[in-house]
Image (spheres, grey):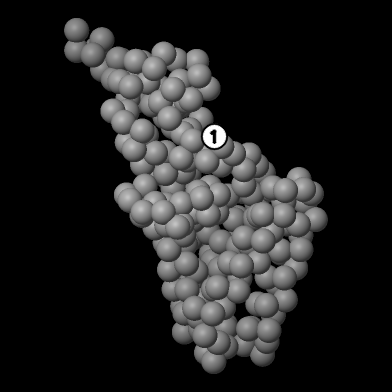
Amino acid sequence: MVETTRKRRSDGEKSRKAILSEAAQLATVEGINGLSIGRLADAVGMSKSGLFAHFGSKEDLQLATIETARALFHELVIEPALVGTTALGRLRLLIELFLRHVEDKVYPGGCFYVSVGAELGAQSGPVRDQAVALSAEWMRLVVSTIREAQAEGHIDAAEDAEQLAFELTGYLLLGNTQFVATQDSAAIERARHAVEGRLAAATRDFG
């Protein structure tokens, strides 16, 4: 009986992960506001009642979807970048892995942060707050990494860390937007080139 209960729980957790993975995919194309129990049930081939057993409301589903996307972004972009031995190395890895996850089409609608953040930015409520928090978390990380690189002497201390983070992220976001619209990797390459040009200016004569 105990083993049966554990198996059911494990199967339920696997099913929930699969559902949320599909939900995140849909959210980047159809919008997270368009994400409903009924729409997702159709997409994953489940009954509404079966899906409702995992999520009690549309808001619960949306919040869980955002958290799932956050976890995957950490797995694919943030955590691998932490292996950099210098702050500048980590910054370059963050940028490259961000662009790579867009080009690899982890989500059909591009970066989850960008897609959902743009959709919900002018709205209010817990779903919007959690979505906006994703972008804020990214910016804090980029700013702190730039400041660490300045402390290590690899980025000019005269650079405004917040401004530099804003500019670098702007290149990434435009690269993401153009790639989604055109499906042309040239947009990703242009973003890389723009980032390298800006970093070259910030690091010239500083290692």
Q: Nearer the viewer, residue 20 or 182?
A: 182
Q: Is residue 149 visible?
A: no
For the C terminus, which image quadrant?
bottom right
Quadrant placement of the N terminus:
top left
Residue 168, x across and y down, in percent:
61, 70
Residue 116, horizontal then vertical, whole percent: 50, 49
Counting from the top left corner in percent of width and height, residue 97 is at: 60, 55
- Residue under circle 1? 26
Identify residue type, mark 1.
Leu
Residue extending farthest top: 1
Tell me: residue 201, above or below residue 87.
below
| Depicted 145 relative to depicted 58: above or below | below
**Residue 96 falls in image quadrant:** bottom right
- Mark 1, other Cα within 10 Å: few <14 / some 14–19 / many ≥20: many
Q: Can residue 30 be seen in this view?
A: yes
**What is the x, y in percent for residue 5?**
23, 14
- Where is 169 relative to 34, above or below? below
Residue beneath the point at 36% across and 41% down: 63
Q: What residue sits 26% from the left and 17% below the top?
A: 6
Which structural element holds mark 1? helix
* Total number of numbered discs in the rendering: 1
The residue shown at (48%, 25%) is 39
Identify the residue shown where x is 39% and y is 51%: 128
